[in-house]
Structure formats: structure tokens, C-alpha cells
Image (cartoon, rainbow, N blue to C red):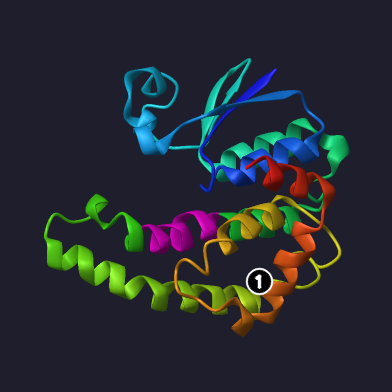
Amino acid sequence: MLKLFHAPRSCSLAAHIALEQSGLDYDISIVDFAQSEQRQAQYLKVNPKGRVPALVTDQGVLTENPAILMYIALTATAAKLIPDNPFELSKVLSINAYLSSTVHVAHAHGHRGYRWADDESAIESMSRKMPENMAKYFEQIENTMIEGPWVLGQTYSIADIYLFTISGWLKADGVDINLLPKVKQHREKVAAIPAVKKVIDAQ
């Protein structure tokens, strides 16, 4: 059985949703950020990075959402969470890499600037800049990355799961989702999927 180490309201929501949709047997272990469990020795044995998600498999531990999402999709082929076409699959990898390396980092600048700077004024500057950057990156997603209704048009994939997770941070990040009609419609459509509703309710 797979075991996902997950923190509520974090990016590990994507892996949780993918597991629920996959039909694979899995268990959830909650990492309590309020108690700094991600930095305690017991969890660092699982993921030395001190982050979530971490997925324990019979072959070892996987970290980082793009890798975990791809593993789930490739393992649960019947769930059809990735396209068969190589070009379309590469588009999934492209948007998930963008969400992970650019959008998530911009979000973190607003809440965890201490990872990149010690100077208080620099941290405050990153925090102030964060809403502008998040709006800019989501405008790029709105205009070039959502074919509609799903990211790939008619094909639902792990890119939709990951985008849904990250777009859930927009309100707290000071971005009005109503200015992003494709993103808003996409979010509403994913939220209506029964497996997604089940995971959100469990949060």
C-alpha cells in the first residue's frame, strides 16, 4: 500500500486528489506544520528535505509533486490521468514544471521569504511583490495554458489536479480569481468531481 505524507492546505493536496482518483490503495499520514513536524527527526527520515508531499512506495520514497503525480498516473493506468500522445504528455509535464518551479516559488516568496533572505527589508519586499507576481503568472496560465474545459482541452489529467491545487491559493495571495474566467471555470469544474469533493471534505 502507498503511504502519502500530507499537510492540509498545502501543495500535497494534489497528490492526495490524484491518489483518490487513481483507485490505488493508499494511506494518509498527516504532517502537522503547526507543530513543525516536517522538521522533526521522525519525518526527516522519510523526507530529508522537510517538505510535503512524500510518497512511500514499495521501491522507496518519492518527493516533489510533479514526480509523485506522474508516478501515480503511470501506476494507475486505468484511471487515465495522463494522455497517451507523447506531445500531449509533454504539455502536462510543461505546465506541472511551471507550477512547481515558478508559480509555487512566487507564492512562497509571500509567506516564507526567510528561505531566500535574512534581511527583513528584503523579506518584506518579496512579500509585497508576491501578489503582483502571482497575478502575472496566472494571467499567463489564463491566456496560454488552458485549452478548456481542461488544461489539455477534452482530456483530464494530473495537470488539472495540480492547477486546481495552486489556484486555491489565489484569494489568500491577494489575486481576484474573477479576473481570470478560465481559471475560475476550471477550478469550479475540478471541484465538482466526486473524488475531489471527497478529499476536500476530508481536509
Quick check: 194 left or right of 12? right
User: In this picture, is 167 found above or below 194?
Assistant: below
Which residue does the numbered mark 1 point to in the structure image?
Answer: 145
Number of dots carrying numbers: 1
Magenta segment: does it hold 107?
yes
Horizontal side of 185 relative to 33 (left or right) equals: right
- Name above or below for residue 126 compared with residue 16: below
Q: Which residue corresponds to the image point at 13% horizontal and 54% vertical from the top-left?
A: 118
Q: Residue at x 78, y 28 (%)?
A: 24
* Mark 1 surroundings within 10 Å by alpha-carbon count, few (fewer than 14), some (14 through 19), many (20 or more): many
Looking at the rendered image, the quarter that the N terminus falls into is: top right
Q: Which residues are magenta?
A: 97-108
Name the residue: 17% across, 66% down: 122
Q: Give the quadrant of residue 70.
A: top right
Q: Residue 121 or 81: which is nearer the viewer?
A: 121
- Is residue 49 visible in this depiction of the protein? no
In magenta stretch: residue 133:
no
Q: Where on the picture, by quarter, is residue 43?
A: top left
Query: Can the viewer see residue 159?
Result: yes
> Image height check: is 134 above or below 55?
below
In front of the other: 145 or 27: 27
Image spot of residue 41 (x, y percent) = 33, 19
Chief SS of the magenta region:
helix
- Percent across and percent down for residue 5 are 54, 29
Most extreme residue toward the bottom, as rendered? 179
Query: Please, which residue is most extreme toward the left here?
Result: 119
**Type of amino acid under label 1:** Met
| Coordinates of residue 86 in the picture (x, y in percent) | 75, 52
Image side of residue 28 versus residue 82, left or right: left
Q: Quadrant of the C terminus?
A: top right
Indicate the secondary structure of the residue bearing disc 1.
loop
Residue 8: image location, x then y, percent: 54, 42
